Amino acid sequence: MKLDQRLVDAAVEQMRRRDRTEAAAVYLEDGRILTSVALDNLNAAASLCAETGAICQAYTLGVAITASVFVSSWGNDGAITVLAPCGICQERLALWGPHVQVGVEDPTAPNGWSVRTLAELNPHYWAKHFVEGDTWPPPEAHAD
């Protein structure tokens, strides 16, 4: 499944349902959508990004993620913004390869966001050093 407005809407719906300022949604290769919110904690080191719950659930189900979107209403006006995944979530999504699509903020796009692959987001991915050639590490390399 490719990242589209339906996935963004699922993340926004989760954010509003939980009365949060951020949420995420992922498409699984079988077409299902998983959503999650950040796990906030008084101890910031124990907090988790909004994507983490959906990523862990996909991994537990053994179904690949094909697209991921993070939405936020941070700021004074409460407008919804699509932001690229942080570096940690890029690492988490890397398990499913360089073609995973992610939403990125794009003020030139009509809806304010556009789609990039992980490879486009991170063309110099460090983990390529540990595999033969200039390829993305396969899932089993991430699990070592």
Image (spheres, grey):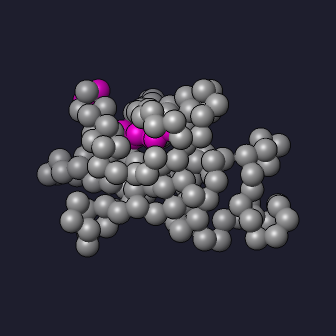
Instruction: Locate the C terminus and report the quarter of the image it occupies.
Output: top right
Q: Nearer the viewer, residue 32 or 54?
A: 32
**78 and 91: which one is in front?**
91
Near-viewer residue (135 or 127): 135
> From this viewpoint, which residue is outermost toward the left?
77
Query: What x and y, as percent, mark residue 111?
Result: 23, 60
- Give residue 42's quadrant in the image: top left
Q: Dividing the picture into quarters, in which one does residue 134 lie?
A: bottom right
Magenta-drawn stretch contains 23: yes
Q: How many dots with numbers?
A: 0
Residue name at image x 46 percent, y 63 percent? 116
In the image, is residue 36 part of the stretch drawn in magenta? no
Name the side, left or right, on which 140 lies relative to 59.
Answer: right
| Up-down relation of residue 140 to residue 133 (above or below) | above
Q: Is residue 18 visible?
A: yes
Tell me if I can see residue 44 in this picture: no
Does residue 28 sit above or below 87 in this rendering? above
In percent of width and height, residue 137 lies at 75, 56
Q: Residue furthest right?
A: 132
- Residue 48: give x, y in percent of width and height: 50, 36
Magenta stretch, main secondary structure, is: strand
Which residue lies at the image location 79% right of the left edge and 66% below the top edge? 129
Question: Which residue is depicted at the point 82% across and 61% down?
Answer: 130
In the rendered image, residue 43, in percent from the top left (x then y), is placed at: 50, 32
Question: Seen in the image, is 96 located left or right of residue 100?
Answer: right
The answer to whether 40 appears left or right of 113 in the picture is right
* Residue extent of the magenta highlight: 18-28
Residue 9, above or below 100: above
Q: Is residue 76 left or right of residue 86?
A: left
Write the residue at 60% across / 34% down. Answer: 63
Compared with 80, 134 (above or below) is below
